[in-house]
Image: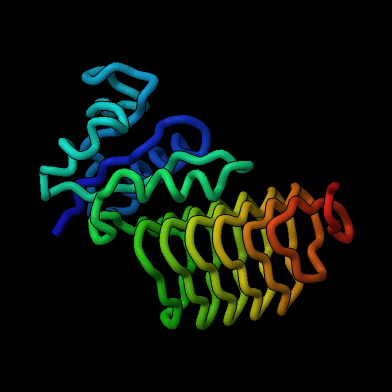
Amino acid sequence: MQKRLVVIGTEGTARNIIEQISGAIKNHGYKAEIAGVVIDIYAAGTKVAGYPVLGGTGDLKKIAADKTLSFIFALFKPEKMKERYDLILSFDIPRERFANFIHPLAYVAESVKSGLGNVIMSHSSLQSDVLIGDFNIISTGVTIEHETRLGNGNLLAANACIGSKVIIGNHCFIGLNSSLRENVQLDEVFVGMHSLVLKDFRRCTVYGVPADVIK
């Protein structure tokens, strides 16, 4: 059955997600359609990225009454990952109404297990026995090595490289071109771009080569 998707968000990474879905539909036979977008900064009925604005976030309960629709959550701020996840829950949309989008040009091993509401963009690579929770965004060109685990509400920016048996808990932001050594553990951590993470961190901001806590 063809999915009817509503993307929540239209700016920045959300626009990338909209256009990756659109490109997957037009160029790779991805079985879905974008029914519209939800955003607070544009009026209902206008078009953004070629798709109608169905309303703002305050209208989601009414929009979700159409049971044929599935949702992709694409609103985020790198420095507010926990707040972003709490916002998803505040909409009170059943978890099963959120779809996974896996771009046809991503590689996802058969042994990967995934929750719901995840976005995996083009040219990403998820290797054997990777485990993913809910509401994660894996951007273009990200590599996740074998037996790594992601919790909920994380964003891995373009070209991040995650080693094997890494544990990324919840609400982490992994910056552009950053690398995580095998076996490290992170939870509620902001990793700045081009960083090299060689040890465990929790509830902090880290940056550098090697990465360390920014006071």
Q: Is residue 61 left or right of residue 100?
A: left
**How many numbered marks are there?**
0
Left of 213 or right of it: where is 68?
A: left
Q: Where, by quadrant of the figure, is residue 80 drawn? A: top right
- Residue at x 63%, y 52% (from the top left corner): 173
Q: Is residue 131 left or right of residue 90?
A: right
- Residue 64 rendering spot, x and y as whole percentages: 18, 43
Q: Quadrant of the N terminus?
A: bottom left
Residue placed most toward the observer, 92 or 63: 92
Q: Quarter-wise, where is residue 196 in the image?
A: bottom right
**Residue at position x 34%, y 18% in the image:** 42
* Residue 125 coordinates in the image, percent (x, y): 55, 66
Q: Is residue 122 visible?
A: no
Q: Quadrant of residue 26?
A: top left
The residue closer to the viewer here, 156 or 28, is 156
Q: Is residue 208 above or below residue 50?
A: below
- When the figure is inspected, residue 142 is found, relative to residue 77, above or below; the finding is below
